[in-house]
């Protein structure tokens, strides 16, 4: 940010830091020589007057002038009335550790700052403010079920009515089973769900983007003139006032008591997630019996109840896990505003 910065060593004005015992600073602008009073460093009565010479000394324009030298030394010049600002400007104090003072304007972030101060229109962005629409809505879609169906078998029996079991025939889904014998009496023993689970895709619901409603920019004052308590700054039409700025979050010193916090931007660490629950998991499917080995020849889907012929030589099971999948959306993370800058203003009068 352009402008003056004051610390315990003196005043920095763009050329360097000057000690507090230097009350006058001459800056040549065009053909004019501007005298600067470094606020907080000298006597409030104004700069020294011109030294007298010869027989008499004229009063200085500012403080007391020194007496002339020589045989007819003149008297010291009379005291002046100090430095004032034009009617269009404000005498703004310098504050230790702060940048400014400068005129500050508020504008839309995507629109150039409307600086119309003096002959200059250049501006410097201080930061963004008025964060809007920080909503973050999530939904879940495409819920899918995973898991296996294991443990299916053909229970065989030696008598009618399927009451006296004998050697079972284990089955694996999708693989043909050809036992060493062809049972006549049998019953399908379905598999049990194993490692059942469900998952869903998290989806952020579309909405207006998170954004800042406005920005604050400082207007370049050029080379301001000095006044009794600081420098002369012209306010910007419709601006926030004459302001000072400092990195971080700080209390505002008087008379800059109107505080604004601005930021460089946002860091969005939010994300969506889906928590799923599987209920009523079952294995649904069937077992097919074949007249020939290796699952060939005539085929028949076997019933879940007792089956009593004709005999089958091979079997193929086909079961899949099913159930009710319930998905709940949740959010994680947070929206972080980057490091703030404190802007303190004297409102326009």
Image (cartoon, grey):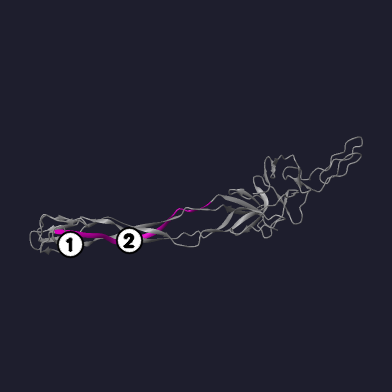
**314 on left or right of 242:** left
Looking at the image, tell me whether mark 2 or mark 1 is earlier in sequence order: 1
Instruction: Count all numbered tags in the image, as a single digit.
Output: 2
User: Does residue 92 appear left or right of residue 327 in this picture?
Assistant: right
72 shown above or below 223: above
- Residue 327, horizontal then vertical, whole percent: 36, 60
Percent x, y of residue 98: 65, 47
Tag 1, which secondary structure? strand
Q: Are marks 2 and 1 in contact (CB under 8 Å)?
A: no
Q: Residues within 10 Å of mark 2 (few under 14, many from 20)?
A: some
Residue that numbered label 2 is attached to:
325
Residue 187 appears in the figure: yes
Decide if residue 281 is in sight here: no
Disc number for residue 288: 1
Q: CA distance from mark 2 to mark 1?
A: 29 Å
| Residue nearest the viewer, comparing 133 with 153 | 153
As displayed, is residue 87 above or below residue 79?
A: below
- Name the residue at 22% across, 62% down: 285
In this picture, residue 167 sits left or right of residue 40: left
The image quadrant that residue 27 belongs to is top right
Residue 191: image x %, image y %?
21, 57
Instruction: Give the secondary structure at mark 2.
Output: strand
Q: Residue furthest left?
A: 159
The part of the chain drawn in magenta is 314-337
Identify the residue shown where x is 62% and y is 55%: 216
**Disc 2 or disc 1, which is closer to the eye?**
1
- Residue beneath the point at 30% across and 60% down: 279
Percent x, y of residue 118: 72, 55
Which dot marks residue 315? none
Q: Is residue 60 magenta?
A: no
């Amino acid at each position: 940010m352009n402008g003056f910065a004051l610390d315990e060593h003196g005043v920095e004005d763009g050329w360097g830091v000057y000690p507090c015992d230097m009350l006058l600073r001459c800056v040549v602008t065009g053909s004019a020589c501007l005298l600067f009073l470094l606020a907080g460093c000298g006597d409030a009565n104004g700069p020294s007057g011109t030294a007298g010479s010869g027989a008499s000394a004229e009063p200085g324009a500012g403080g007391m002038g020194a007496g002339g030298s020589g045989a007819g030394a003149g008297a010291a010049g009379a005291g002046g009335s100090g430095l004032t600002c034009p009617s269009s400007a404000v005498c703004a104090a310098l504050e230790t550790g702060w940048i400014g003072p400068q005129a500050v304007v508020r504008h839309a972030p995507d629109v150039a700052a409307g600086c119309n101060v003096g002959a200059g229109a250049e501006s410097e962005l201080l930061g963004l403010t008025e964060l809007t629409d920080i909503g973050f809505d999530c939904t879940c879609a495409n819920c899918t079920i995973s898991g296996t169906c294991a443990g299916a078998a053909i229970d065989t029996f030696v008598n009618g009515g399927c009451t006296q079991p004998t050697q079972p025939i284990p089955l694996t889904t999708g693989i043909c089973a050809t036992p060493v014998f062809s049972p006549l009496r049998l019953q399908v023993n379905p598999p049990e769900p194993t490692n059942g689970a469900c998952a869903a895709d998290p989806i952020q619901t579309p909405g207006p983007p998170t954004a800042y409603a406005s920005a604050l920019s400082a207007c370049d004052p050029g080379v301001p003139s000095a006044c009794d308590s600081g420098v002369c700054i012209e306010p910007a039409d419709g601006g926030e006032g004459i302001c000072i700025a400092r990195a971080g979050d700080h209390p505002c010193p008087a008379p800059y008591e109107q505080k604004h916090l601005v930021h460089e931007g946002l860091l969005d660490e939010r994300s969506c997630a889906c928590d799923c629950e599987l209920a009523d998991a079952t294995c649904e499917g069937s077992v097919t019996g074949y007249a020939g080995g290796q699952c060939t020849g005539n085929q028949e889907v076997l019933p879940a109840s007792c089956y009593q012929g004709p005999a089958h030589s091979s079997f193929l099971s086909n079961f899949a896990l099913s159930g009710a999948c319930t998905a709940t959306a949740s959010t994680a993370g947070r929206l972080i505003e980057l490091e703030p800058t404190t802007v303190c203003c004297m409102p326009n009068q």
